[in-house]
Amino acid sequence: MALTNFTEYENKKTVSELYCSVELIRGVDGELILLSSLNIFLSIAAFLGNTLILVALHKETSIHPPSKLLYRNLAITDLCVGIIAEPSYGTYFTFVVKKRWDICYHANWAATISGYILCSVSLLTLTAISVDRLLALLLGLRYRQVVTLRRTFITVIALWILCIVGACTYFSNPLITSWCAYINIALCLVTTIFAYTKIFLTLRHNQIHVNPAQSHVFPGQPSRAIPLNIARYRKAVNSALWVQVTLIVCYLPFGIAVALTPQRGMPLSNYLARNYAATIVYLNSSLNPFLYCWKMRQVRQAKTLRELYCSVELIRGVDGELIFLSALNIFLSIAAFLGNTLILVALHKETSLHPPSKLLYRNLAITDLCVGIIAEPLTVTYWASVVNERWDVCYHANWAGSFSSRTLCSVSLLTLTAISVDRLLALLLGLRYRQVVTLRRTFITVIALWILSIVSACTIFWNPLVYSWYQYIGTALCLVITIFAYTNIFLTLRHNQIHVDHVQSHAFPGQPSQAIPLNIARYRKAVNSALWIQVTLVVCYVPFCIVDALTPQRGMPLSSYLALNFAGTILYLNSSLNPLLYCWKIREKTLGELYCSVELIRGVDGELIFLSSLNIFLSIAAFLGNTLILVALHKEISLHPPSKLLYRNLAITDLCAGIIAEPLYVTYFTSVVNERWDICYHANWAATYSGFILGPVSLLTLTAISVDRLLALLLGLRYRQVVTLRRTFITVIALWILSIVSACTIFWNSLITSWCQYIGTAICLVTTIFAYTNIFLTLRHNQIHVDHVQSHVFPGQPSQAIPLNIARHRKAVNSALWIQVTLVVCYLPFGIAVALTPQRGMPLSNYLARNFAATIVYLNSSLNPFLYCWKMRQVRQAVKETLRQLYC
């Protein structure tokens, strides 16, 4: 772009000869690529920013229509710079580098003409705004009669016609265009300086006039504030002046560069200086939206976050939805914490990944981990404070949650963009990749991403609309870069594959094409993995962006508030899904290769035979014991039906462990000893699958029992209305479906199944601990209350027994807690053994430890019937009655 593109006119050189010549641009490819990239960024920023401003001006009704029309015209001009002038300029640089002189010539013409028109319109519009502000001050009440919308519209049309005519002189002689530009700039600056000088002198005179008048009307009292209309006018003038000053600062370097360019010829330094200065001119179109948001209160959002998100009117009647969102985010928080912790441990052990690539994946996992332990808990705190109407906590939790989530989401997006660029460089650079992409440079890049994200998130303390504007620009840039990178990757891979097929067809005529070379196939898998993570992020982020864009600036309907919060939860879901994607796309050995290999089990026949015998015994014990318990529960009528259903489900699970899982496990051991690998493979799959179903069902059922006991205590008389047999039956069905679905992931990737088990176990344990802690604290409080009442009713007498219902409830809780503790004790060794097993390969000691620990897990199914008989009096009596009927 150039406001002027004059050349060595005496020799009648064309623009193409000056700006599209090998001699001029030799050795500056790097600078031109930088300028091209910078202009693409500024183009997107100008497009998104000015689009937002146009939408905001459309919604704003307090600004005088003629003034609004001038600001609209300025925003439209800046928008056209972003979608016409800057892309033309970027195209010119691209084709100069590629030495496509035919396209270069036309791109330079387009950039120069569009740049001249749009920059002239911007300058004239700002001059018109300064005159409009002066007329508003001088005319007073007559202003709205004189400055009408029709006259302003005619003025705007005239500005555009004048600029287009001036630009057309470029085809005749560029020197005329330059001369017109100098006159235009001088006239505009003189007019603007005159207008603002007159405005400030008049305002100063009015203020001096107001103060003496006040001193006469209110003698002895200090001068009051400036009248409202003058103060408001001063702010409007201040805003317009800031926009004007920014334009001058951005245009000044270009004016200096043009003035210092010699008439005859153009040195390389002048060529580069003019192009850098022209880029600064275009920067003005990207800065203006920031200035509107900063200096114009009407344009930016007026309501504070406290008024929007912490108000009784907004959240009335949505307590249920907020509690549901809180519970869902607690689950996602735990999942994100456990999943990303596992991924960080796995990446620490992994040695085959290139260190810079590993650092980027580590950074992504750390970001997702921080979402789980910082952003989501703060969001839950916000919702809890809203439900409890703790507005002081609500305000700070909302600020902290917004700041942390914006920072972390930005880092995630930027890191995935960096991963896409890393994959592209790995393909394009080839052997030079490891020299160019070093660990040090990648580390600096990661630090820069965090600094950029934190700085951008800090704008929320200044103006949330500025951050939203940055968010849209950043997201668009990241998506454009990512799409460009992956498109380039797949096109290059396709080209390489065609080339390989062509070579093979000539080297081996008549033979079918061989497989893709190993390095290309491996690279394609790595790219595919990165692309899946990128697509998942986009899918999770898109709903929030759409809802945010559709949310009105003034006020917020309840539907928009709920939609924003649900979309925010989907956004957080990405941090919990990423570990699944890492596990899914990692290639690993099959269970058959791990557990059915001669090398692994050589010399352990004796141990495997012992384990087989032990599991046969436990299988029989589990079958007989749980059959008795089921018969006893059928006869028992004193237990509440929903509670009985939960115990029945637990006994059925243990029974299935005895008649399905353990026999399959024994079959596996037998086939290993006899080296029947075909049977071994299927038996191992079946045993593992059944174990992964029955184990979670037991754990989930015991968690449901703990929640049932807590509800029985807290709800009191309402317990039987809330906890019905139908609802409990649905819950039991849901537990089985959830366990079967999670177990099915073993056919996809066993690492995902393990990850699901860890998250599920952690959530169950946290829920159980919370329930029993609440129960015992409530029982203790009730006991203290009973003792206190008795001491007042029967003074001097010892405290009587605990009321019957509390004592009975305490026994029921005690029984359930014993069963829970036994399960934890039996499952803990297996969890430790799995955690200590290395990812690559499996030593014999780990193999034996895992199998002995799995046997202890199955022991739990045989112990539970004993616990029922020991700790539950009703069940014990029913078992005795059943045995008496069998033997008598």
Image (cartoon, helix red, strand yellow):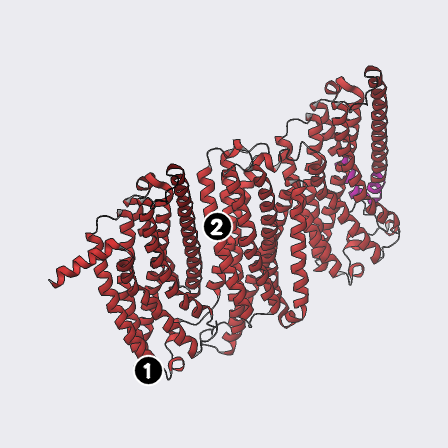
Provide the major secondary structure of the magenta segment: helix
Q: Nearer the viewer, residue 92 or 851?
A: 851
Judged from the image, the secondary structure of the residue bearing numbered disc 2 is: helix
The quarter of the displayed image where residue 803 is located: top left
> How many other residues sit within 10 Å of disc 2, few (<14), some (14-19) or many (≥20)?
some
Q: Nearer the viewer, residue 34 or 508?
A: 34
Q: Quadrant of the C terminus?
A: bottom left
Q: Is residue 46 above or below residue 299?
A: below
**Residue drawn at (74%, 50%) of the image:** 108
In this picture, which residue range is highlighted in magenta?
161-180
The residue positioned farthest toward the bottom in the image shown: 603
Q: Circle 1 is placed at which residue position?
A: 606
> Are the residues flagged by discs 2 and 1 in contact, CB closer than 8 Å?
no
- Examine the structure image and report whether residue 188 is included in the region drawn in magenta: no
**Left-right relation of 407 to 735:** right
| Distance CA(mark 2)–CA(mark 1) | 47 Å
Residue 54: image location, x then y, percent: 64, 35
The quarter of the displayed image where residue 271 is located: bottom right
The quarter of the displayed image where residue 800 is located: top left
Looking at the image, can residue 101 be seen? no
